[in-house]
Image (spheres, rainbow, N blue to C red):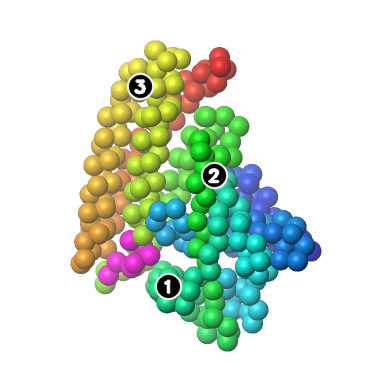
Amino acid sequence: MPNPFNEQVIEEFRANGGRVGGYFEGARLILLTTLGARTGTPHTTPVGYYPDGGERVLVIASAGGAPRHPDWFRNLVAHPRVTVEDGVFRYEADALVLERAERDRMFARAVEADPGWAEYQAKTDRVIPVVALRALPKDGPPNIEADSMAEALKLVHDAFRRELTLIRKEVTEQGAASLGAQLRVNCLTLCQGLHNHHTGEELGIFPMLAGHRPEAAPVLDRLRHEHERIAELLDELRRVVAAEDADPGRVLSEVDRLTSELEAHLTHEEEQLIPFLDLAGATR
């Protein structure tokens, strides 16, 4: 039976490239589509997630500490192939329920990031499961929920903006004592994502534009130089985050520096590149 609250969140999520307000505002959120355990009917549920580096994300079947597992968890146990939407990309994934030792490590990492998970566990006798969602390898470009290259670029940029805002908030709330394990993963995942995005632009969008719009050459040259500068900032953030005695204050300083220069780069790229992308799309 449809859940009115979930339906509203799903509609808002899809209409706004992953941005929602209300209860989920400022949270990392995905839409998880599972097949009903008995019926095989698709069901979509908004769930929070944690980056895990590489090709997987983690979701926690807390159900707010209820005595029973949530429906989406029972569904994926029966049918582990699921669909994930993150506001930019839509992809198929395999769901793996983590075994106890790994589950305990990942759950502890989540509790370190948000003590509310421990409160949920304390409310129930069941061991709250942690599930890894691993994206399936796919030939060709990823499925972006956009109608044009220009729209896709803006969606990707906005996702990086949101993630940087979240990381900055998390570093600030972490305090001066230590840098949590999940926060380290979040930072390193962001760094890898930005690197992959810029590499994709330089191998895909830039050569395409150079061929269709030769007058874009000065813009592309400047953007390549900006990519080099962002790469330097990412390398420094990686170095600071990976240090055994990482200082949250130093991490915050590097996140602020990256945020400032990356926002200027993203804004400049949108102002200069999107008109060329629109022209290239119109002539193809």
Question: Which residue does the numbered mark 1 point to in the structure image?
Answer: 102
Question: Answer yes or no: do the residues labelled 3 and 1 have beta carbons within 8 Å?
Answer: no
Instruction: Give percent across and percent down for residue 164.
Output: 39, 51
Q: Which of 66 and 174 is in front in this view?
A: 66
Disc with the residue nearer the chain's start (2 vs 3)? 2
Task: Tell me the CA gap for discs 2 and 1.
Answer: 27 Å
Q: Is residue 216 above or below residue 14?
A: above
If you read the primary sequence from the N terminus, does the residue marked by circle 2 or circle 1 appear first?
2
Q: What stretch is highlighted in magenta?
A: 178-184
Q: Nearer the viewer, residue 228 or 257?
A: 228
Residue at the location (72% across, 62% down)? 36
Is residue 181 left or right of 160 when viewed as pictured?
left
In the image, residue 259 lies at what x, y percent?
A: 34, 46
* Cα gap from disc 2 to disc 3, whole angstroms: 27 Å
Q: Which residue in the structure is indicated by mark 2?
A: 89
Report the residue marked by disc 3: 219
Whether residue 181 sits left or right of residue 33 in the image: it is left
Mark 3 nearby-residue class (10 Å; few <14, some 14–19, many ≥20): some
